[in-house]
Image: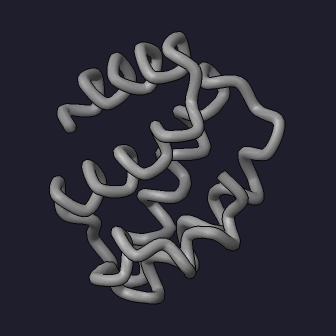
Amino acid sequence: MDSKQLFNNDALKGIDMQKIMLLQEMFGNSKGKSTNEMLPILMAASKNANSKGLNFTKDEVKLVVDVLKKDMSKEEIAKTTKMLSILGL
């Protein structure tokens, strides 16, 4: 998914715009990266959000991941699910 699509996705309309902007930045940093390379990027994005007083709820994370899964292969979905499980999400 193109990061710009996050702004226009109806499923994500309820998420604070600052959080969407952080997600867009994260996608920019992760372009072309493998799923394995995403963990450090996710951790950095989480730290960045926390430093700004923004915390994604588990429901928000699930919603974003569900939207992103629509453009993932079965293998990517499995890896993402495993990564989220490791993170306790």
Image position, residue 3 (x, y; %): 67, 64
Where in the figure is residue 80, as x and y percent of width and height?
43, 26
Q: Is residue 63 left or right of residue 58?
A: right
Q: Residue at left 54%, top 20%? A: 76
State the residue at coordinates (19%, 32%). 88
Q: Quadrant of residue 6?
A: bottom right
Please determine whether, in this image, residue 79 is positioned above or below residue 27.
above
| In the depicted structure, whether residue 17 falls above or below residue 20 | below
Q: Residue furthest right?
A: 32
Residue 41: x and y, percent? 60, 44
Figure quadrant of the C terminus = top left
Applied colour scheme:
one colour
Name the residue nearer the viewer: 22 or 78: 78
Seen from the viewer's position, the closer of residues 10 and 84 is 10
**How many numbered markers are drawn?**
0
Q: Residue 31 occupies which quadrant of the picture?
A: top right
- Left or right of 19 in this view: 45: right
- Residue 32 rendering spot, x and y as whole percentages: 83, 36
Vertical comparison of 20 with 48: above or below:
below
* Residue sitting nearer the eye, 29 or 47: 29
Q: Residue at x 18, y 63 (%)?
A: 57
Residue visible at 63% across and 58% down in the picture: 26
Q: Is residue 44 left or right of residue 63?
A: right
